[in-house]
Image: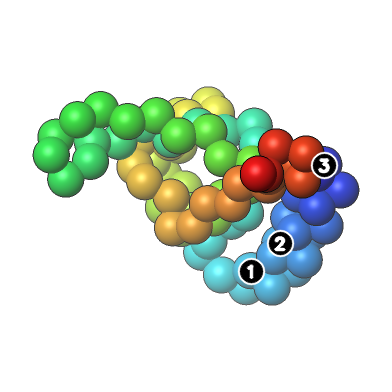
Amino acid sequence: SDLVIVNFVAAIRYQLKNSTCYVYSDNVQYRFKDNQGNNKIVIPDASINCRTKSRRGNTFTDAPRFVMEVLDRKSVV
């Protein structure tokens, strides 16, 4: 699954090179409120965020534009 994430991040990073968006691997987390006002934390395998000013260290204070989770084939029933 690590190879899938690395390949995805590399391919998308190239496509976003002239964009205000950036692709991140699994080293960032997102803290935000859902539509019901509940606090949420998401740590996706890969993500795309276009509001990089909301980043504090490895934490974003908004929801990502895109998230990717890679499932291990052994865990899929």
Q: Which mark is residue 35?
A: none
| Residue lying at 59% horizontally and 51% vertically, measured from the top left | 68
Q: Which type of secondary structure does the marked residue at label 1 adopt?
A: loop
Q: Position of residue 4 (x, y in %)?
A: 80, 52
Determine the secondary structure under disc 2.
helix
Question: Which residue carries the number 1 mark?
Answer: 16
Which of the 4 image quadrants contains residue 30? Answer: top left
x and y, in percent, of residue 57 in the image: 53, 26
Residue of label 2: 13
Few, some or many residues within 10 Å of mark 3 (<14, 14–19, 20+): few
Residue in the image at 19% along x and 30% along y: 38
**Of tags 1 and 3, which is closer to the observer?**
3
Does residue 56 appear anywhere in the picture? yes
Q: Amino acid at mark 3?
A: Asp
Classify residue 41 as left or right of residue 36. right
Q: Position of residue 50 (x, y in %)?
A: 46, 58
Q: Of marks 2 and 3, which one's residue comes earlier in the chain? A: 3
Q: The disc labelled 2 sits on which kind of residue?
A: Arg
Mark 3 highlights which residue? 2
Instruction: Tell me which residue sits at (64%, 69%) in the image.
Output: 16
For the point 73% across and 55% down, the residue is 9
Circles 1 and 2: CB distance less than 8 Å?
A: yes
